[in-house]
């Protein structure tokens, strides 16, 4: 998409570049090609479990080059929010990994693991070791009036085995127990994207992500174009039904589409397909199935109609492949 004049590409990681320990095919080659075009690269992740250096090590194991300065995590965003709201040296109860605790310390605050009268805030990020005891300490602190910052609220976490419970699922447990809403630091808040773009010196960055309620919503909140890929959480069905705040500007099967002209990926009318409005959207024609999805989303978003039917076997087969029949 170099023809569109983007001066940086901000990549989501989980579900976009990799699934856990498995790289998504074509990701290393695509990131290298973006760099070779002279376009800045940043990795923007809602996963707060790893420090930037650990993210870099993981990327390198998967065949991607990266520097720690190119990585922006929701743990860093959470620590930044705490640093803005708390006095230096304030105690923060950490529900998450040691790398999250390190970010809290780097912000001039004191990370702790037990609730007490001196605890001024709770910060919660994903960790596979988070347990009931951790949530219990956080519950006590939040009920006592501590500021609650969630690094992110992703309900699920893409992995090589499928979707697993994400930090948002654990946040939901605390929300139920405390009847308090957390301050969310990561996506869909625009802070991570704004910080990443600023670090790259970018005036017109493109976001690439797989999740409507975080990647796409966060990019749009930051006023950025966004390419939604179908390698993670988003599906054709969720895209057709997407609310205005979660509608990407571009769609593709995976991030290898970055080598194609931007107009070919933009949501809107596409050659070969016709979508007629009514009580049901009627699809006819033939061509690439993702072109059909791009055309279908444009009409569904404009009309508010999300029920679809096909006219003809070719259109029916395309809808079936998209899971929309």
Image (cartoon, rainbow, N blue to C red):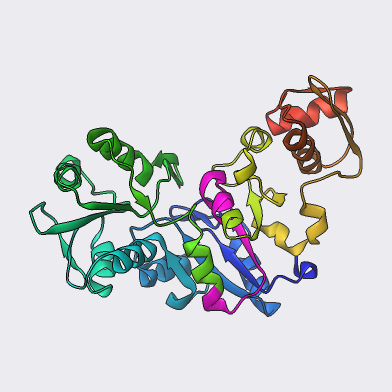
Q: Which residues are magenta?
A: 198-218
Which of the 4 image quarters holds residue 295?
top right
- Up/down of 153 relative to 305, above or below: below
- Up/down of 279 relative to 150, above or below: above
| Total numbered badges shown on the rendered structure | 0
- Up/down of 320 relative to 31, above or below: above
Q: Where residue 179 appears, x then y in whole percent? A: 27, 35
Which of the 4 image quarters holds residue 111?
bottom left
Q: Where residue 53 appears, x then y in whole percent? A: 37, 72
Residue ID at (77%, 47%): 267
Residue ID at (32%, 42%): 171
Instruction: Give 45 or 301, whichever is nearer the viewer.
Output: 301
Q: Is residue 289 left or right of residue 236?
A: right
Instruction: Give 65 or 112, whichever is nearer the viewer.
Output: 112
Image quarter in which the N terminus is found? bottom right
Q: Is residue 198 left or right of residue 205?
A: left
| Res 166 visible | no
Instruction: Give 108 or 319, whichever is nearer the viewer.
Output: 108
């Amino acid at each position: 998409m170099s023809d569109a004049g983007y001066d940086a590409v901000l990549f989501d990681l989980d579900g976009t570049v990799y699934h856990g320990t498995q790289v998504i095919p074509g990701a290393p080659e695509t990131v290298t090609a973006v760099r070779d075009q002279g376009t800045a690269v940043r990795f923007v992740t809602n996963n707060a479990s790893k420090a930037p250096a650990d993210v870099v090590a993981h990327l390198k194991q998967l065949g991607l080059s990266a520097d720690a300065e190119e990585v922006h995590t929701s743990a860093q965003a959470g620590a930044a929010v705490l640093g803005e709201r708390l006095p230096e040296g304030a105690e923060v109860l950490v529900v998450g990994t040691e790398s999250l605790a390190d970010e809290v310390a780097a912000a001039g605050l004191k990370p702790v693991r037990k609730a007490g009268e001196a605890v001024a805030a709770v910060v919660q990020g994903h960790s596979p070791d988070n347990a009931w005891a951790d949530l219990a300490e956080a519950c006590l602190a939040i009920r006592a009036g501590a500021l609650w910052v969630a690094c992110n609220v992703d309900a699920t976490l893409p992995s090589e085995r499928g979707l697993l419970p994400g930090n948002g699922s654990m946040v939901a447990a605390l929300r139920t127990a405390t009847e308090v809403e957390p301050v969310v630091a990561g996506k869909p808040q625009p802070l991570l994207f704004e910080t990443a773009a600023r670090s790259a010196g970018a005036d017109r960055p493109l976001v690439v992500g797989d999740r409507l309620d975080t990647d796409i919503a966060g990019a749009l909140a930051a006023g950025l174009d966004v390419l939604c890929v179908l390698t993670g959480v988003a599906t054709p069905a969720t895209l057709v039904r997407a609310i205005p705040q979660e509608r990407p500007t571009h769609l593709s099967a995976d991030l290898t589409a970055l080598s194609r002209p931007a107009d070919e990926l933009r949501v809107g009318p596409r050659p070969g397909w016709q979508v007629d409005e009514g009580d049901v959207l009627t699809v006819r024609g033939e061509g690439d199935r993702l072109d059909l999805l791009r055309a279908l989303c444009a009409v569904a978003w404009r009309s508010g109609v999300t029920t679809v039917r096909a006219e003809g076997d070719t259109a029916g087969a395309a809808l079936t492949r998209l899971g929309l029949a």
